[in-house]
Amino acid sequence: FPNTASLYIGDLAPDVTEAMLFELFNQVGPVISIRVCRDAVTRRSLGYAYVNFHSVLDAERAIDTLNNAPVKNRPCRIMWSQRDPSVRKSGVGNIFIKNLDLEIGHKELYDTFSVFGNILSCKVALGENNHSKGYGFVHFETEDAAQRAISKVNGMIMISKKVFVGRFIPRKERLKSRETSWTNVYVKNLDKEMTSAELEIMFRQWGEVASAHVMFDNDNQSRGFGFVNFILHSDAARAVQAILNGNFKNKEGLAIYAGRAQKKAERSAELTKKFEKLKIERMSKYQGINLYVKNIEDDISEERLRKEFSPFGVIRSVKIMTDEKGNSKGFGFVCFDTPEEAQRSISEMNGCTLSGCQKPLYVNMHEPKEIRRQKLATQISARAKAMRQAIPPQGNQPIYPGAPMYYPPGNFPQSFVYHQQMIPRQRWNPPQHQHQFPGQGHIPNYVVPFQARPPPRGNRVLPGQSNINRRSNPNPNPPNSTNGNPRKDNKIVQDETVQNFFDIQHITASQLGEMHPDQQKLVIGEKLYPLVYQKEPQLAGKITGMLLEEFVLDDLLVLLDNEESLNSRIEDASKVLQEFQEKKEG
């Protein structure tokens, strides 16, 4: 047996959770922990997980009894967790099987090849609706077992098809060898009257042709392209060069094109690589001069935006993004001639409110999506690490950093951590007085931090109310507070901005930026909660707490401005909470 009781679980559906896997694997033996690996930013499942048992014998039994067991109608693949990546990447003992009958699944493939030796992993490639793609892989523990399987099964009839079994060749090696061994030529811009026989005669002058075929549609009309397969690679390469360098044209005067025949995936990969190269060139060209501007109100035109930014330098272009109906999306781009002009524009225009507008502009350097995604992942990772260091566990009190580990009830260690999507979370330790939202009979799942705690309920100023009532309150000292209150002696006193932060309709971006991060979250929560309540009144507190925990300030402001994006996040959070509640009740 291996010296570890950790198992790798692959081929999982995107919506499989730790709780589902716990129900399955706990039947075999006591489980220490389960982890579904997720994307650092989107938190979507990557399709695999790790299960840790107390006993190696239990892990061995799980492989024997649960391998290929259906989880959410998809068979899971179980193997020992390999800490050393060289074992997986070496390709030793790994074989490839193609031309499989579509009725052959993971189990049938495993039963067929298990007679040749111990199998580490066995997989049939699945497409949409979990249907077989007709090929698969078997990874043996030893190279000898793999060679025996190749010699015995290659060319054998399985159900109704003759299968091919050979050594697995990594993709990079296959692509490299293909460059010097291809024989199939793609030809386009052919005459509509040309037949397959005429196409073969045309290419015989460059070498022996194995086959030639012109493609036709359902009406038996030529589609203007075809394929010519040569016996030798050198003849195929010579034919392509002759067509491209020669003066071969069809009756309409179009030049005939010839090139190596490629599969759709290969063509897509080449086009993607080409576009990425152009994208990088474009990014470097506009680096430091292209500005991103948001909070643009609907009545602001591109001419008005150009006029507002023109005092800071020469503007190359201005673009306000619109939807399919021509309505402004509220953001756009301004491209200057030099980086100095762009920086001067950011200094002057960021946070500036245009004449006749209510919202201040947000102006910053434009960053590609990939860079923003990378920065967001770094921020989330750093925040989770800081929380783990700053909030030590107290007894059996659970904490909620970003650690994606699930410990089953009763089996958790002293500092156990639930998976962050399985239960609602609180960002701050609960103070003595929890904040209650207007018109709600229950306490939301996020609470007011100590430093930013609002006045007691009798003195509270609700959004939209005047501050006069608070100033004229006959009881200036709220309950539980005196002139000798140590909090006041410790100078934990809110400034005027914080005292008025409940009137969030009039908070400016500059005021919000001066607040403590906890205070910022609270202010955003005051505005976010009523919007969530409209969609999910029963779960509004929990969902608000989850949104405040998951997103940084800029993303929360975007959610407040984008109703469609907010509704999508609310639906995702509601689904997670409902699934957790169903599991808890079950």
Image (tube, rainbow, N blue to C red):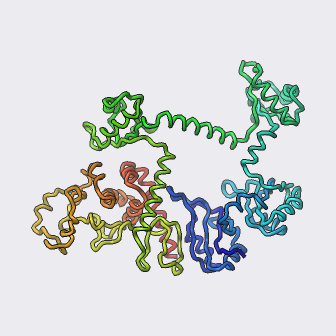
User: Quadrant where the N terminus lies?
Assistant: bottom right
Q: Is residue 162 left or right of residue 65?
A: right
Q: Nearer the viewer, residue 209 or 133?
A: 209
Asked whether the viewer can see residue 226, the reply is yes
State whether residue 386 is above or below residue 586: above
Does the image show residue 103?
no
Q: Residue at x 78, y 44 (%)?
A: 177
Location of residue 489 in the rendering, given as x and y in whole percent from the top left corner:
18, 69
25 to the left or right of 177:
left
In this rendering, the count of numbered labels is: 0
Seen at 51% across and 59% down, the residue is: 43
Q: Is residue 261 left or right of residue 355?
A: right
x then y, percent, for residue 218 = 75, 36
Q: Position of residue 403 (x, y in %)?
A: 50, 66
Say if 559 sits above or below 199 in the image.
Answer: below
Q: Quadrant of residue 201?
A: top right
Residue 153: image location, x then y, percent: 87, 60
Q: Is residue 316 left or right of residue 489?
A: right
Identify the image quadrant of residue 127. bottom right
- Give residue 529's quadrant in the image: bottom left
Q: Residue at x 41, y 36 (%)?
A: 333
